[in-house]
Image: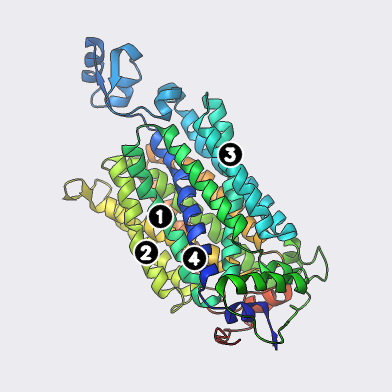
Amino acid sequence: MKLSVEETLISLGNFGTLQLITTAVFSLYQFIACVVAFSVSITLKVPEWECVTGKCADAVRDGNGDLMAAFCQLSPSDYRWTSRTNIATEYGVYCSSAYLAALSISYYFVGYAVGTTSLGVLADRYGRKRVVVPVLLIYTCITGLVAGSSSYNQFLLLRGISGMLHGGLQNVTHVLQAELIPPKYRNACNTIKEGMFGFGLSISAIMLYYITSWRLQFVILCALLAVVAFVVATVLPESPFYFAGKGDMDSALLSLQKISRTNRVPLPQSLVLERPSKAGSSPTSESIFGVLRVSMVTKLGVLSLFYAFFTMALLLYCLSYHVSAVPGDVYNNSFLMGLTSVPAYYWLYKYGDKLGRKKCLTNLYLLTVTSLVVAWSDSHGTVLFQAITVQLLAFVAARSCMLAIASLMYLYTSELYPSSARSGLVGLSSMIARAGAILSSYVLVLDTYDPSLVYIICLVAALLALVLLARLPDTAGTQLPQSFAECDALFRGQGRGPVEDLSRVA
């Protein structure tokens, strides 16, 4: 029986033990990555304080309601912290040194941009698992070192390295999961995994509220990362698509045999794996540089995806880090933003296959644009219930949509790019997204001049992404392209089409 790698994978069960373990372990990793990435935006804020001297009381009274300006005129003996101390208070990164707090975010995303492409290229050359396991072990060690950092310079350096490792892992784990799970459940498992990223923001807010030491939090994350590294190293196989993309069909068959043993489903009798068209023909033509040799339609499609990634990160991080400017308590707002992402992920889980990837993305962008318009029109914050305002709800809705878009974009590009260069191209897309993430911190500075500017930039960027994505092909239920020839055909509307469910074939 002659079958493609995708068809053979389906014959071993659409969702067996291997797929369950893959989804669970990468969902746990995604949760950890969210806490590592976003917890710093909360712990770098100046906590609550109160006056202990008359000089302090006079400064507050003369400050005309600007408590931060009054605080920055005081000496440490004039006040005391009334809530837990954090990174900002421990390293003194506030008032005249407040710019150092923004550096923590910039270092992280500069490192992310470096890691996202370099590790993706390595994963295409040496294998997904062969990159993920050692990088996970290093990431575990770096997270532990962050907990023991003795100066802010050390903290910044470790944040940059942590961002680099997270960037690489983010993309390669996306690709490895997409290549180990058949089309029928690929969207569902991806949504569950990405849902942990939004859920992680809520848990992060709870952890930071109840765990008084930010160092202890990083120790806990270090232990969880060690568990993830152990499971990936001992249970998951190398991707059969990686070997097929290299033309090594014998190794691809060995990977499928490991999946067969884990799922306890025998391989089809007399199995012969179908070799992908032009697979392993040339190291250069099937690397990320192969995108330069495809048709103009495919090139324009890839450029559209690059811009969509840039816009996705720009809006997501603008909305995430702008939470402190929204009326209400930062812990409550962060928890609410994470919690309310659940409906968006559920919608994606339910309709990601029914409507298709492209239609889901365009609908989510329309909802984002609508929510931003509502938030912009309610700039004064009309109170609905206690601290809940119309602006906050619209703000939360827009961010929830962007989280769902981010989830689907990684899956969508994994299904569009060929196996021979999938990790590298997804990594390159993600590196371009980091430019949007870095730019987001500077866009937010415009809020001090005119809050409308932030909304205008986000709206224009979202509308352009909506137009560009509408011109791309859909990939729901289709076979993963394994070479640039198959990728080119997919962009030109001549893809291989939906695969037959062979899960009962043995």
As drawn, 103 above or below 349: above
Q: Which residue is mark 1?
A: 198
Q: Which residue is mark 2?
A: 344
**Mark 3 / mark 1, whichever is N-terminal:** 3
Q: CA distance from mark 3 to mark 4?
A: 27 Å
Q: Is residue 182 left or right of residue 336?
A: right
Residue 438 visible somewhere in the drawing: yes
Disc 1 residue type (three-letter): Gly
Residue that appears at 48% across and 29% down? 99
Give the amino acid type for the residue marked by disc 3 in the picture.
Cys
Residue under label 4? 190
Q: Secondary structure under badge 1?
A: helix
Element carrying mark 4: helix
Q: Earlier in the sequence, mark 3 or mark 4?
A: 3
Nearer to me, 72 or 77: 77
Q: Is the residue marked by circle 3 packed among few (<14), some (14-19), or many (20+) residues within 10 Å?
A: some
Residue drawn at the location 31% of the way across and 44% of the way down: 326
Q: Nearer the viewer, residue 359 or 279?
A: 279
Q: Nearer the viewer, mark 3 or mark 4?
A: 3
Q: Position of residue 175 (x, y in %)?
A: 60, 63
Q: Confirm whether residue 415 shows in the render.
A: no
Q: Which label lies toward us, 3 or 1?
A: 3
Identified at 62% across, 63% down, the residue is 303
Query: Which residue does the numbered mark 3 point to in the structure image?
Result: 141
N-term-proximal mark, 3 vs 2 = 3
